[in-house]
Image (cartoon, rainbow, N blue to C red):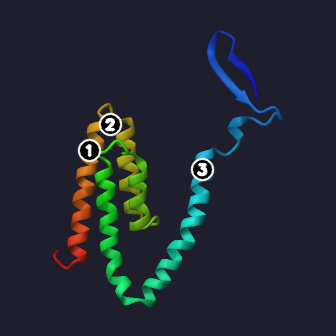
Amino acid sequence: MCIHVVDGRDADAWRLDDVDGVDADARPDVAGRVWTVFGMAVFPLGFALAVVEMQQPALARVVPIAVGVVVLIAGALQFSAWKGWAGLMAILLVVGVMDLGAMAVVTAAITVERVSLAGERVARAVGAVVVGAGLFLIARAAGLG
């Protein structure tokens, strides 16, 4: 990699270019590639689960409880040192990645947690709401709600 100064007056402004001359900004980011591969692996698993769920009524009754448990665990992770977007992204996997409401809520929660000056408190508040949602989903799936 070649490193050169972008602005001669500001020695801290660096730009990294690959030796082949392709601008590093023009390349897809690594995180995007990771999410693409992850999505390619998860989609067939979700499809297979849906097929089995339609064929096995017992499994179809258990899945809503499992969704509630995953949401509950994701909320609990917000109180731990492991907090972060991974638990909230797990919510999207079980609730439905194509659910625009879920996407909006998770995106807002992650954004507020990241940009807030009180990010730790926001993460705990989000965790409390998510734990409550998980408990509600479990109760509803068990026929209590």
Question: Residue lying farthest front?
Answer: 81
Q: Which residue does the image show at 30% across and 43% down from the upper left?
A: 123
Label 1 environment density (alpha carbons within 10 Å; few <14, some 14–19, many ≥20): some
Mark 2 or 1, nearer chain start: 2
- Residue 39 is situated, as x and y percent measured from the top left of the image, at 56, 62
Q: Which residue does the image show at 34% across and 69% down from the upper left?
A: 67
Observer-side mark, 1 or 3, equals: 1
- Residue 28 is situated, as x and y percent measured from the top left of the image, at 67, 46
Height in image: 105 above or below 40? above
- Residue 69 is situated, as x and y percent measured from the top left of the image, at 30, 66
Q: Can you tell which quarter of the image residue 101 is in?
A: bottom left
Which amino acid, by three-letter code, is at mark 2?
A: Gly
- Report helix, strand or loop for mark 3: helix
Q: Which label is found at residue 119? A: 2
Q: Which label is found at residue 32? A: 3
- Report helix, strand or loop for mark 1: helix
Q: Are marks 2 and 3 in contact (CB under 8 Å)?
A: no
Q: Along the line of sight, which residue is nearer the eye, 139 or 96?
A: 139
Q: Name the residue under label 1.
A: 124
Label 2 environment density (alpha carbons within 10 Å; few <14, some 14–19, many ≥20): some
How far apart in space, not on screen, are marks 2 and 3 (Cα)? 24 Å
Mark 1 or 3, nearer chain start: 3
Residue 27 appears left or right of 47: right
How far apart in space, not on screen, are marks 1 and 3 (Cα)? 27 Å
- Residue 112 is situated, as x and y percent measured from the top left of the image, at 35, 42
- Report helix, strand or loop for mark 2: helix
Question: Residue lying farthest top?
Answer: 9
Which amino acid, by three-letter code, is at mark 1?
A: Arg
Which amino acid, by three-letter code, is at mark 3?
A: Gly
